[in-house]
Image (cartoon, rainbow, N blue to C red):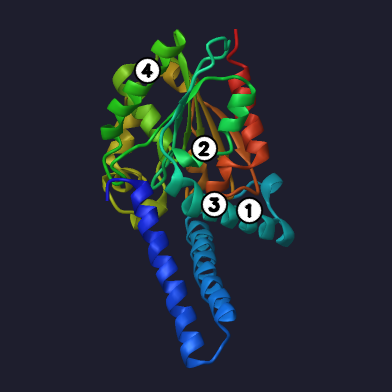
Amino acid sequence: MKSARRLLRTLLLVQLGAALLIAWALAARAGIAPWQAALIGFASVALVRLLINMNNFVLAAHFASATPPAFRLGPKARLRLLAEEFRASMLVTSWQVPRASAATTIYPDSRHPPVLLLHGYGCNSGYWIHLTPLLDAARISHASVDLEPVAGSIDGYVPLVEQAVQDLRARTGAHTVAIVAHSMGGLVARAWMRVHGTAALARVITLGTPHHGTALARFGLGQNAFQMRPGSRWLRELAQGEDAAARALVTSVYTHHDNIVSPQESSRLPGARNLEFGGVGHVALGSNPRVLAAVMEELAALVS
């Protein structure tokens, strides 16, 4: 399926059907009151979603890099980590992505370089629902891109990025743009840099990007998932095509408790500015207040 929006809408319908089927079975066969049966049906679907989320943490732990002592968590902090990541995942996949489409907001009098937002694997522009209000409050022009098809090649997204970059420059009159990218989107940004250079680039800020691949990509579908496997030829060629000047334009924000990028140190990019966090999951990087504050600080530093 080409569109993440359509894919997740389909999955939501499947989940709705499963919840209603459970509710019907409980009401018809067990004599449970319809409202109670419906509650149990929807709770059952939510429980399955929670178990899937927990399983991601289990898989990530199997391939994890060592967590530095300063970032190790106690039981309560681990529960907060799971709760925040589950909440973020539910909102992104069940509300934000199914409703979103790419959009552009221009502030003609802004002193900031405009920002291009690139989402990650299996998402769309809806991922940025928590960052865009902060950009609006700072009067920073911004645009998002829906990277489609969902399972396409990372290199295939490069023309979409180039078109968006040139459109932002034309509409704002800015010489350079900044890119904020989550997960796979950071690799898309680097692939764009390899093709089009850095003359039009002020900064790339990546959030939870598997710069050296993630072991969990072996469970993903599509050419992009294959490219994100550790040690892939595509990742090696991407790294070989970068010089020190290009790397110096990158800020890599990552978490030592990423439940999708594993080993987590895969997000540390040599030659880049690396900002490390703890107690934050992969999807929650786009909504965690500490992470968003760091992104806004990086963007504020670009004002001349």
Residue under label 3, please give it.
91
Residue under label 1, please give it.
84
User: As shown in the figure, which amino acid type bears the numbered disc 2?
Assistant: Trp
Q: Is residue 64 above or below residue 163?
A: below
Q: Nearer the viewer, residue 128 or 180?
A: 128
Q: Which mark's residue is nearer the viewer, 4 or 1?
A: 4
Q: Is residue 113 above or below residue 261?
A: above
Q: How crowded is the residue under tag 4: few (<14 C-alpha within 10 Å), some, or many (20+)? A: some
Residue under label 2, please give it.
128
Residue 18, percent from left and from top: 42, 73
Residue under label 4, please give it.
167
Spatial CA span between label 4 and label 3: 30 Å
Spatial CA span between label 2 and label 4: 19 Å
Reading the chain from its start, which is encountered first: label 3 or label 1? Answer: 1
User: As shown in the figure, which amino acid type bears the numbered disc 3?
Assistant: Leu
Residue 9 visible in this rendered orientation of the protein: yes
